[in-house]
Image (tube, rainbow, N blue to C red):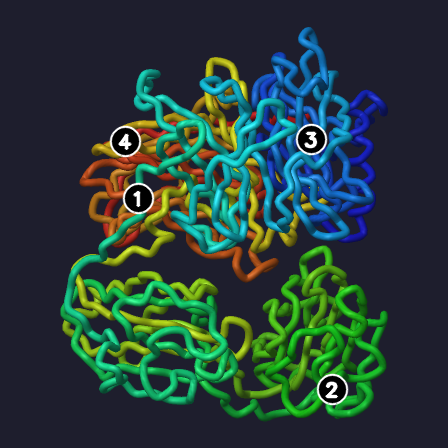
Amino acid sequence: MSRTTRPRRRLLAALAVLSGLGLVAASPAMADTLYHEQYRPQFHFTPAQNWMNDPNGLIWYKGQYHLFFQYNPDGNTWGNMSWGHAVSTDLVHWKQLPVAIPQDDQEMIFSGSVVLDKNNTTGFGTKKNPPLVAVYTSAQKATGKQEQALAYSTDGGTTWKKYSGNPVLDIGSNNFRDPKVFWYAPTHSWLMAVALADQHKISFYSSPDLKHWTHQSDFGPAGATGGVWECPDLFPLPVDGNPKKTKWVLAVNLNPGGIAGGSGAQYFVGDFDGKKFTADDSGTYTPPSGTVVQDFESGSFGDWTATGNAFGSAPATGPVDGQQTVTGIEGKDFANSFHGGDAPTGTLTSPTFTVTSDYINFKVGGGNHPYQPGSVLGDGPAPTGATLADFEDSTYSSPIGDWTTTGDAFGTGPAQGTLPGQGQVTGYLGGGLANSFLDGDASTGTLTSPTFTIDKKYLDFLIGGGNHAASSDAPTAVELIVDGKVVRSTTGPNSETLNWTSWDLSDLQGKQAQIKVVDANTGGWGHLNLDQVVLSDTQAKPHSDETGVNLLVDGKIVQSATGADSENLDWASFNTTAYKGKQVQLQIVDANTSGWGHVLADQFTAADQPALSTTQRAHWLDYGQDFYAANTWTDAPGGRRVMTAWMNNWNYGQAIPTTPWRSADTFPRQLSLKTVNGRVHLIQQPASELTTLRGAGTPVPSTRVANTTAPLAVHGSALELQGDLTPGTASRSGLDVRTGAGQRTRIGYDTTTGEVYIDRTASGATDFDPTFGGVQRAPLELHGGRLSLHVLVDASSVEVYAQNTRGEQVTLTDQIFPDPSSTGIDAFAEGGTATLNHMQAWQLKSIWP
């Protein structure tokens, strides 16, 4: 959709919401547009327009499921946080209502919960008409403090009034949020689970009246702690359907630090006595035994070779000057590149040795700066050729003429390095660069070159600044324009460090072109840095900015691992099965000079089994990238426990290419606990109401595939698929969905790793953020049996429920943004044969008018 049509779409969507409230009559033109825009989910809840994140306040009341949610009434990115509101009688068809609790001048309304105060303990209603009470986090605009507050409704949730005695719970913290409240019958009191976000703790409080709270206990840190803890939920479930055997489930969402990167949702199973939660899993871990390759306990680097000055002259025995406390050390010595702070760089490389084991396990910590394939260590020479701009003059003059500006972001001439209020800018050459941070991120504008002839193979340039793709609503991008069209574009990496990018122009030789630098973004990282634009016959390679550990074969990096922006060393593993008998090296690399620009490493061990990190050992509600802020409905009929989550990720959530709305919720899932091999597992299934959307079913004959892709007689962009997969001799096999136009989303099983995976690298639009594409994996051994797959496909998402014959289950949820014409379904196998058995497919009807 072109940008010029967006204001009209926004107006139509706004009018349609009013129509749903009975305020405006819908016209036929509106019916053709509303809820049928490109990428609009057809059976997942989305707001008619604007930004949505966490579901909260979930409650069933008088025949309706109420869904409240974090909502921006005024825009399509995060801000102005208020509680949106929608209701449903069947968890499938939703009616959006007016904003329930709006922000005001003093506070934003962060996440929380809603309860029915049946006994009128608050006095907000009467015994005949007990109130609904919202317990929410009041985010104070003046101070940033987060307090727990109340609002109540006596008309079934339509209108809400804030309690005059707010806040009801204030501990003076800026990281105290997302209360989940429920009635605990054994003590006749209200209980609250609330996150101490930056401490990785969940606090439990009790109250007789929702107004006065007493602290009972804290749980954590435990499980995954790579990011802040948010949006807790605590609830009981019978084990194996036995009401006399009950366990409690504590769901904890965290960001970043999810298993797939960025946002994630983990859970703990245990016991709760009304005051304290105790997890069944103690979290203790003993890694596989093996032969130590290097543990640095000799007090020297031994025969490992050091370059640079980051690692000092010997292993560290703890934090060095200026460093925070270091944890997770094995023994007393370890490699630490924080000598002199984050600015120094260097490497520490082992001698060559022969691989004799399946795995090399080790501990790694420090900065999260992964190795980027194609990057090179050190500062290589700048590419030679025809310089189109080096920005060394006081004006935007260049060898090809004057570059022209619009707006106010680029000023009248190049910047001389870092601008006021900006983080330290590095990586540019000489004294000047184009820098659109003039007057901060709020300024916008363009910088355009004169026309030039493309007469060399590559265009090389240094780029830094914000990551907002040219295809996004508000880009920060460098564009190449030929014949009036953008034929190449690149955005920044959300870093003030400039690095080389290169465009191959082989297909554009002899063409007239212009370079346009666009800053249309006024939010965070809403600026761009550019320098040294050169037409060249040499392809510039980016400098490595990694902090991590690499496995080298013939001098080339074949596997790598990085830290988690943490001073805690955690286990990692290289699978060396393919390199048995070969000569390899281990290399610890610090090539980063910015924040968290250091690496920690220890205890390299050759072993027959992989060591698992804390993140890998955590219990995840979902292994995809788009399952966050998971929460369950209170008071659902029949005691059922139904969960939904925000189907997005804070890594790229505000950049996904949807308009006039942004974000959806997952399809509701019914939860249960099941004992498998002596351990209690959380099992998830799509809410049974999904079947009401089914059209005619299409049985798919058993399909055997061998090293190929076979189209199936099923097409659609809103589908439910159920079938069994027998991997056979194939190394990888499964289903491709939303195929066509060179696109596919691959849902597969990898027998070499024992993992279910979603590969969305070719799923459609992926260029809006560098963290979006990729492969998400979930461990699930088949033990020689089949894999049962239950897949929900919508206009912009896939949800995968995968189970082995023992009853163990994993789920993966990912957004995708394919072309509307990509509706095919294929079976595939790589490295052998596989069989797709007993598959049934249903077209799913839209829930929208």
Give the residue type that dot 1 points to. Ser
Residue type, label 3: Leu
Residue 150: image tag: 3
Answer whether labels 4 and 1 touch (C-beta < 8 Å): no
Classify 10 Å Cα crowding around label 4: few (below 14), some (14-19), many (20 and above): some
Across and down, in percent, residue 401 comes to 80, 88
The residues bearing labels 4 and 2 have C-alpha atoms spaced at a distance of 62 Å
Quadrant (top left, top right, bottom left, bottom right) of the C terminus: top right
Q: Tell me what residue is drawn at x 75 percent, y 66 percent.
A: 441
> Along the horizontal axis of the image, is 257 left or right of 306?
right
Q: Nearer the viewer, mark 4 or mark 1?
A: 1
Identified at 54% across, 19% down, the residue is 635
- Tell me which corner region of the image, top left, top right, bottom left or bottom right, holds residue 88: top right
State which tag comes first along the sequence, 4 or 2: 2
Q: Which mark is residue 655?
A: none
Look at 50% across and 44% down and name the residue there. 253
Name the residue carrying label 1.
Answer: 282
Q: Amino acid at mark 2?
A: Gln
Q: Residue beneath label 4, please?
A: 807
Asked if residue 530 lies left or right of residue 502, the reply is right
Location of mark 2 (residue): 416
First in residue order: circle 3 vs circle 1? 3
The number of numbered discs placed on residues in the rendered structure image is 4
